[in-house]
Image (cartoon, rainbow, N blue to C red):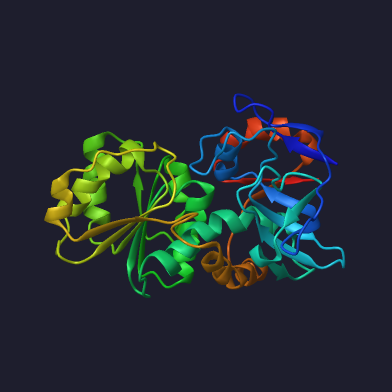
Amino acid sequence: MHAAVVHTFAEPPRYDEFPDPVATGPGEEVVEVLASGLHPRVRSQADGTHYTATDELPLVPGVDGVGRRADGSLLYFVLPDTALGAMADKTLVDPGRSIPVPNSIDPVLLAAAMNPAMSSWVALKRRVTFTPGQAVLILGATGSAGRLAIQTARFLGAGRIVAAGRGAERLAALTALGATDTVDLAGDDETVAQELAAKAADVDVVLDYLWGPVTEKAIMPLLLARTDRSRLLSWVEIGSVAGPDIALPSAALRQANVCFSGSGQGSVSAAGILRELPDLVAEIGRGTFSVDAVARPLAEVAEAWADAPARATERVVLVP
């Protein structure tokens, strides 16, 4: 079969031949891949920087997708850490890590939406005690996952949604998705700190797709400006687009009631994630979420890989 194949972590994958998958046990099933999203998570898998990465090469990237079973039915699947990913003509799936989806659903739309949407969906359902009416700050709101986080928070009943990202034009478009306030992170440090303190100090939940220096500079202005510092602030780290590390002042943990946690593989079990997905699939199928999906042939994986960073608000989907 053909697949996107990583031969070295120093180079992007290329369209190449790869051995056909063979099911060897009751927990494996060969499916025809219909669509697989080129998510930031997949890029870090392919360059060896994700925290689950191993040194195993060659590697077919792709962590999830939409497939067709031998009986013609469709499923959405999430793969374990494996060298045989979803960006191929066929792959091996564990039925226990997949859910059936209607044959009427658009595979490209579903493959584009599920990974970025589940990041906020699972975080708000599994990592915090979120109740309708609470306020949410989204750091990294102008990216594909951040835009879906706004819509997810709105769908789940957030009373106020502060969207922080870069670019006036991109931020202006977020109001239609449900953002009630915006903060442009492209400003100077003092201006950004003042805006975050004024607009987001009293939120209940932070969904953080950035981490790194952006988060580091945001923590204290937010905490010190809270009207009631003893009221819980749940800070959920989901991505690290701005950097993998922060310096956290010990005073932050003493001066305010803040709880830092993460949402991703390990912090939520695969079974726990899968239990939340049928409802998300249903909402995507109903058109609840606005998603910019761009389909590219799998044979053009090298070109799609190079183009993807420029498509911040879009999600590229590879189609065999």
Res. 192 in view = no
- Name which quarter of the figure residue 15 lies in: top right
Quarter of the image for the N terminus: give it: top right
93 or 229, which lies in front? 93
Q: Residue at x 58, y 67 (%)?
A: 274
Q: Is residue 81 above or below residue 155?
A: above
Quarter of the image for the C terminus: give it: top right
Q: Residue at x 55, y 62 (%)?
A: 270
Q: Position of residue 59 (x, y in %)?
A: 68, 37
Q: Residue at x 31, y 43 (%)?
A: 215
Answer with left or right where residue 149 lies relative to residue 257. Answer: right
Res. 232 in view = yes
Answer with left or right where residue 67 lies relative to residue 176. Answer: right
Answer with left or right where residue 71 lies relative to residue 224. Answer: right
Q: Position of residue 30 (x, y in %)?
A: 80, 56
Q: Is residue 202 above or below residue 222?
A: below
- Name which quarter of the figure residue 84 lies in: top right
289 or 261, which lies in front? 261
